[in-house]
Image (cartoon, helix red, strand yellow):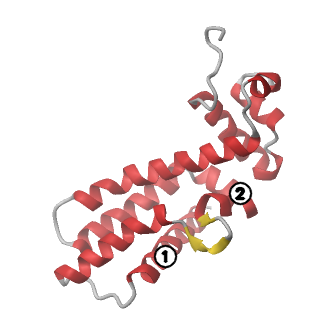
Amino acid sequence: MISGELTPIDGRLLDGAQRAVVRYGAAGATLERIATEAGVSRMTLHRHGVSRADLFTALAQRLEDEYQRALWPALVGAGSARDRLRVALEAECGVAEANLELLEALTGDARSGVFHEEGAPALTREVYVEPLQRLLADGVADGTLRVEDVEETATVLFNQVGHTYRHLRK
């Protein structure tokens, strides 16, 4: 490999993909445009076997990783579950803020690919709701939260907080 050339799906390429999605929307973020935004040729992507689908998968993974890192302190921190849930929801808003343009540019299938289980568009992916489920269950156990259905409440919280935050930031 030539020095300075990208490795398959490196940070520079992901940043370029994100810029292309923000600039042209998910549907308009062609491999050509992604390559241009990343400062490489489309042929370079082809030679490395990088597809548009691979890039969207990698962008989704980067969002997941960022979300998990942001919520970790709430999961392992001290204090009541109610207080830690507030920290977690603030962290969710922080991730949304850091990725606001990308999240607004993702529509339809691209958004579903990030947030919903494959084949079941109504189900929010476990990676996003499981931390909230854990905090809600902890709250029931320590008496700081009253929740009938932890899974349903976690899904509603994740979606309501995330969508509302992004809507108000427009």
Who is closer to the viewer here, 152 or 21? 152
Q: Position of residue 114 (x, y in %)?
A: 61, 58
Q: Residue furthest top?
A: 3
The answer to whether residue 144 is seen in the rendering is no
Residue hosting label 2:
110
- Cα separation, mark 2 vs mark 1, equals 19 Å
Which quadrant, please, contains the N terminus?
top right
The answer to whether 36 is drawn above or below residue 139 in the figure is: above
From the viewer's perspective, tell me whether residue 169 is left or right of residue 1.
left
Q: Within the image, what quadrant is residue 59 found in?
A: top right
Which quadrant, please, contains the C terminus?
bottom right
Q: Position of residue 41 (x, y in %)?
A: 79, 22
Q: Residue at x 61, y 8 (%)?
A: 3
Q: Earlier in the sequence, mark 2 or mark 1?
A: 2
Who is closer to the viewer here, 86 or 73? 73
Q: Residue flagged by tag 2: what amino acid is it?
A: Ala
